[in-house]
Image (cartoon, helix red, strand yellow):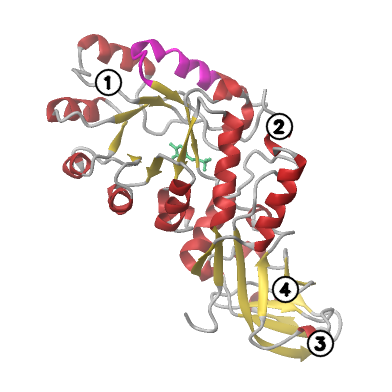
């Protein structure tokens, strides 16, 4: 790692604590499957999965067979569900690595039945998301025609489109459509909710919840106060400090012009690290306990900040500038940049030098305080 690199710090203890919180919320009869696709949302597939396995996670959902094979090498016993099963091309690897395939339609099913070998599978049912998934009517017809052969799904699932809005009618419509196919395979488990769906109530938990965002601390359901732990920090070095006069333009497009004599700082992080370009002039960073606004456009490798109000003795060239901190997490950064928390997380994770830590003092303090207050989950609005 070069001295001038932005560092994305992943707090594994916060991730496992969020997973535990989800388990507490849904109770013992519901399984929490961890969604670790896309390199665990950019946070590191093997590190994140390792931590989750150590606190009892048994089912992992990955994007493709490459991720699945990496995970299988680490955890021989886990259930690994491949979202993009890519049948029939990936059939051999799915069988040999003992993976669980996601089956989306008649063609997948046809192949699976002829292949034999009893590949376990999750059946995706279309209930209103309009991305893959088998139509419920078609599913009943296929069952009737014997298209399933001797196979039966381990789990029948569907994906909610609007679960971040508890008042949206489509949540209940999707739920009814999924429940209506339960009788086709009465032994199969049912799954509907991802992170935000958990807060829609017990009726949405069914047998398995598939949780990504909440494990990574993203508050998709916009809970207030947010019970989830922040799982990442982002810092980058201050590489230049200079003073400029009033009415001087700063950066591309002169989107910021100084109103006063200004002390500028240049920080070695830009949009190629995943910092949202649209955060320009819309967020504050922290240097120690002091705040400093981001001014002018965010460039590919650099970001400019206004240090005029930061005491001079707090400033050192090469010192750390915090872009994510207790008061400003991924959700806030995404809002400032007009994008989603998931996009912001995955881009930062892919763009920065990443380090993993465990037993973070700040997280440990909050965990201890909350334990004293009693399990937080009892306060969450779950009906
Ligand atoms: C990504 C994904 C999830 C996890 O969604 P979150 O909202 O991040 O918890 C669950 N199910 C499926 C099918 C997914 O693709």
Residue tagged 4: 295
Q: Position of residue 166 (x, y in %)?
A: 66, 29
Circles 1, 2 touching at the beta carbon (< 8 Å):
no
The Cα–Cα distance between marks 3 and 4, rounded to whole angstroms, is 19 Å
Query: Element type at marker 4?
Result: loop
Q: Nearer the viewer, residue 362 or 45?
A: 362
Residue at 63% across, 56% down: 330
Badge 1: few (under 14), some or many (20 or more) residues near its Cα, within 10 Å?
many
* Side (left or right) of 125 relative to 23: left
Which label's residue is closer to the chain start, 4 or 1? 1
Residue tagged 3: 312
Residue tagged 1: 152
Q: Position of residue 244 (x, y in %)?
A: 78, 89
Which label's residue is closer to the chain start, 3 or 2? 3
Which label's residue is closer to the chain start, 1 or 2? 1
Q: Position of residue 156 (x, y in %)?
A: 38, 24
- Residue 186 on the magenta segment: yes
Residue tagged 2: 378
Which label's residue is closer to the chain start, 3 or 1? 1
Badge 3: few (under 14), some or many (20 or more) residues near its Cα, within 10 Å?
few
The Cα–Cα distance between marks 2 and 4, rounded to whole angstroms, is 43 Å
- Residue 88 on the magenta segment: no
The Cα–Cα distance between marks 3 and 1, rounded to whole angstroms, is 68 Å
The Cα–Cα distance between marks 3 and 2, rounded to whole angstroms, is 46 Å
Magenta segment main secondary structure: helix
């Amino acid at each position: 790692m070069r001295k001038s690199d932005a560092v994305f710090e992943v707090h594994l203890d916060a991730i496992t604590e969020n997973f535990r919180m989800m388990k507490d919320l849904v109770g013992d009869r519901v399984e929490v499957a961890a969604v670790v696709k896309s390199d665990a949302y950019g946070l590191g597939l093997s590190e994140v999965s390792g931590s989750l396995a150590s606190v009892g996670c048994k089912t992992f959902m990955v994007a493709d067979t490459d991720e699945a094979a990496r995970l299988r090498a680490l955890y021989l016993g886990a259930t690994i569900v491949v979202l993009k099963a890519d049948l029939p091309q990936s059939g051999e690897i799915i069988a040999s690595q003992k993976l669980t395939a996601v089956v989306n339609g008649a063609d997948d099913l046809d192949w699976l039945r002829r292949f034999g070998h009893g590949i376990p599978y999750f059946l995706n049912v279309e209930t209103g998301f309009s991305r893959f998934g088998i139509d419920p009517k078609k599913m009943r017809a296929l069952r009737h025609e014997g298209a399933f052969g001797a196979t039966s799904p381990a789990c029948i699932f569907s994906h909610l489109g609007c679960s971040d809005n508890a008042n949206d009618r489509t949540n209940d419509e999707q739920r009814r459509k999924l429940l209506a196919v339960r009788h086709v395979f009465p032994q199969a488990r049912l799954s509907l909710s991802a992170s935000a769906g958990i807060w829609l109530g017990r009726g949405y938990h069914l047998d398995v919840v598939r949780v990504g965002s909440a494990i990574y601390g993203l508050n998709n359901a916009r809970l207030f106060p947010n019970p989830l732990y922040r799982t990442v920090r982002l810092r980058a070095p201050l590489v230049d400090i200079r003073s400029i006069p009033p009415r001087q333009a700063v950066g591309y497009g002169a989107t910021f012009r100084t109103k006063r004599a200004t002390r500028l700082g240049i920080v070695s992080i830009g949009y190629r690290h995943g910092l949202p370009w649209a955060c320009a002039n819309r967020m504050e960073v922290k240097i120690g306990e002091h705040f400093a606004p981001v001014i002018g456009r965010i460039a590919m490798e650099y970001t400019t900040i206004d240090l005029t109000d930061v005491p001079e003795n707090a400033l050192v060239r090469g010192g750390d500038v915090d872009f994510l901190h207790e008061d400003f997490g991924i959700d806030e950064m995404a809002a400032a940049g007009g994008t989603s928390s998931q996009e912001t997380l995955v881009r930062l994770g892919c763009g920065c030098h990443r380090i993993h830590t465990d037993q973070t003092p700040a997280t440990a303090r909050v965990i201890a305080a909350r334990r004293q207050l009693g399990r937080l989950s009892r306060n969450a609005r779950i009906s």
